[in-house]
């Protein structure tokens, strides 16, 4: 059973400083890895999807995937107070169900 | 552009009462649709998925059922709510358009069972 763990549990950064979030998973054969953002129990906003080792950038959000180390990270460049939210790492299992296994999230607070 | 709409936004229901949550997607034909559930303070879990009209697969047993009556509609329901059904329900659709397929989520329904 794929397990997804995120760290840190919570993170506070100053506006403009880089924010880095981590996610480790237990099964390296998974297809895709995604980072989502959730504001106050609202719907999820997809930030970055990555499926091959290396880096993928979407605006101010950059994901790094290293399957050998079972690790995917998210870096937020120049974070703003509006970026304060819970960030969720999701790992997909192979097969038609598109079952995503989510981590428990990192609560990011960006102070102005 | 595709849009996904969930209703209601929030519900407060009594234990033992019935429930029906809806999800509609526009702008995408024959979408793969999914129901996810997030208990308060818990992680998101996939409940059901549907590839086509009339076909629904259950992923987690929570005394809930789902139906796909139309191509663009996915319904989550139960005849008798339990306290443990409280939480946040999200509908999602799967985009195959890019090489890294992604699930896009609706804005969710907050369910409180008393």
Image (cartoon, coloured by chain):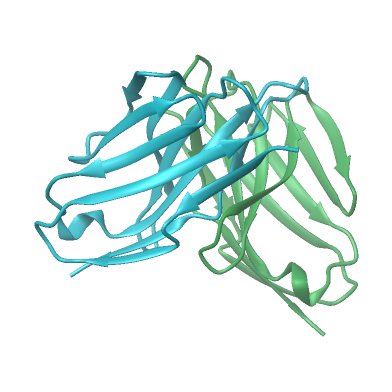
Chain colours: A green, B cyan
For the point 33% across and 28% down, which residue is it? B59
Q: Quadrant of the C terminus of chain B?
A: bottom left
For the point 75% across and 67% down, which residue is it? A83
Residue A31, image x, y percentages = 63, 21
Q: Residue furthest front?
A: B70
Q: Is residue A57 left or right of residue A66?
A: right
Q: Is residue A1 left or right of residue B25?
A: left
- Return the residue nearer the eye: B8 or A74: B8
Residue B36, image x, y percentages = 42, 42
Q: Quadrant of the N terminus of chain B?
A: top right
Count of marks overlaid on the render: 0
Q: Quadrant of residue A12?
A: bottom right
- Return the residue nearer the eye: A42 or A78: A42
- Return the residue nearer the eye: B94 or B1: B1
Q: Is residue B16 left or right of residue B57?
A: left
Q: Is residue B69 above or below residue A8?
A: above
Q: Quadrant of residue B113?
A: bottom left
Residue A7, image x, y percentages = 60, 56
Q: Residue furthest top?
A: A95
For the point 52% across and 23% down, which residue is it? A93
Residue B110, image x, y percentages = 39, 62
For the point 48% across and 28% down, which residue is it? A99
- Return the residue nearer the eye: B99 or B33: B33
Q: Is residue B76 left or right of residue A40?
A: left
Q: Residue furthest bottom?
A: A112
Q: Is residue B43 above or below residue A71?
A: below
């Amino acid at each position: 059973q794929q397990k997804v763990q995120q760290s840190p549990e919570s993170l506070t950064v100053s506006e403009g400083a880089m924010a880095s979030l981590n996610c480790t998973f237990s099964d390296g054969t998974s297809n895709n890895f995604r980072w989502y953002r959730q504001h106050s129990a609202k719907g999820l906003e997809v930030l970055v999807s990555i499926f091959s080792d290396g880096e993928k950038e979407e605006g101010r959000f950059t994901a790094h995937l290293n399957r050998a180390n079972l690790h995917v990270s998210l870096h937020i460049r120049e974070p703003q107070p509006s970026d304060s939210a819970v960030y969720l790492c999701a790992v997909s299992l192979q097969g038609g169900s598109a079952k995503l296994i989510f981590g428990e999230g990192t609560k990011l607070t960006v102070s102005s | 552009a595709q849009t996904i709409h969930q209703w209601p936004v929030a519900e407060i229901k009594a234990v033992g009462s019935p429930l029906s949550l809806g999800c509609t997607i526009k702008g995408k034909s024959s979408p793969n649709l999914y129901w996810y559930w997030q208990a308060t303070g818990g992680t998101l879990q996939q409940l059901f998925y549907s590839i086509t009209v009339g076909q629904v697969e259950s992923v987690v047993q929570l005394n809930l059922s789902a139906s796909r009556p139309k191509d663009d509609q996915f319904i989550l329901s139960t005849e008798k709510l339990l306290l443990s059904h409280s939480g946040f329900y999200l509908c999602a659709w799967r985009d195959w358009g890019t090489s890294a397929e992604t699930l896009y989520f609706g804005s969710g329904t907050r369910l409180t069972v008393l």
